[in-house]
Image: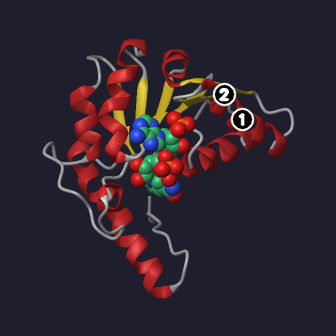
Amino acid sequence: MPLPSSVSIIGASGALGQGLALRWAQAGVPLVLGSREAQRAAEAAAAVVAAVPGAAVEGVDNVAAAAVSPVVVLSVPFSAQAKTIKQISESLTPGQLVIDATVPLAAQVGGKPTQILGVWQGSAAQQAASLLPEGVHIVGGLRAVDAGRLENSRITESLTALMIGINIRNKAHAGIRITGL
Ligand SMILES: NC(=O)c1ccc[n+]([C@@H]2O[C@H](COP(=O)([O-])OP(=O)(O)OC[C@H]3O[C@@H](n4cnc5c(N)ncnc54)[C@H](OP(=O)(O)O)[C@@H]3O)[C@@H](O)[C@H]2O)c1
């Protein structure tokens, strides 16, 4: 599969955004890192370049980041998802792909990280789909495995809470692998 011309990460100063940025930088993907504060985005970009010298990474505010790449990753807490989408919506254009990484963990509203919040639309990804401009495509998750309709994101998002619970109980870093494809 060809690499995208660039990938923008909204909320790139966070744990997931930094992890994704490092791995994509190592794979040679040009990156545009977004933050609510351009200065924080610049610092996040500098951290990636320090770890991956020569990486093509810049840091800008979320609204600017959303406008420039064919692929845009939304990596903010669920509690900030709707607000963030509304902020970047005017920057998005039909044909762009949004990868929604948000998981509606109860921890984000003071509950347990092993529990999932109920979302009226069915899942965080479906809530995102309901808020994004027409013509902007959306998928939930990051592996290029076709898992069917967006409704199935309620299952994949729930796996995060399950894995957190398994890892807490077993003091492990267990994961899930799709085999046989
Ligand atoms: N961490 C993981 O391993 C992991 C794995 C799977 C899924 N996820 C999901 O991916 C998303 C991001 O995870 P994370 O651990 O990177 O989260 P995080 O560190 O808590 O937040 C990511 C970024 O979102 C921005 N943000 C925080 N609060 C905000 C608010 N109230 N309004 C707007 N922006 C806000 C911040 O960037 P600025 O302050 O720079 O704007 C922050 O650095 C979450 O929904 C999480 O459930 C995380």
Direction from residue 9 to residue 139 in the image, left or right: left
Residue located beneath label 2 in the image: 39
Report x, y in % for residue 42. 70, 29
From the image, which quarter does the C terminus lie in?
bottom left
Between residues 149 and 26, which one lies in front from this camera angle?
Answer: 26
Relative to residue 178, is residue 172 depicted above or below?
A: below
Query: Where residue 77 sits in the image (x, y, percent)?
Result: 40, 46
Residue 146's place in the image compared with 70, above or below, is below
The residue under the point 55% across, 31% down is 35
| Coordinates of residue 138 in the picture (x, y in percent) | 34, 32
Q: Which mark is residue 43?
A: 1
Q: Residue visible at 48% across and 87% down?
A: 170
- Which secondary structure, mark 2? helix
Q: Position of residue 51 (x, y in %)?
A: 81, 46
Quadrant in which the N terminus is drawn: top right
> Disc 1 residue type?
Glu
Q: Nearer the viewer, residue 163 or 15?
A: 15
Q: Using the rendered view, name the quadrant where residue 87 is placed.
A: top left
Identified at 32% across, 50% down, the residue is 147
Q: Secondary structure at mark 1?
A: helix
Residue at 40%, 21% (x, y): give it: 88
What amino acid type should be assigned to the residue bearing mark 2?
Answer: Gln
Which numbered marker is on residue 107? none
Question: How many C-alpha atoms fall within 10 Å of the one at disc 1: few (<14), some, or many (≥20)?
Answer: some
Are the two marked residues, 2 and 1, in contact with CB atoms closer than 8 angstroms? yes
Alpha carbon separation for disc pair 2 and 1: 6 Å
Q: Is residue 78 left or right of residue 44?
A: left
User: Could you tell me if residue 143 is visible in this image?
Assistant: no
Figure label count = 2
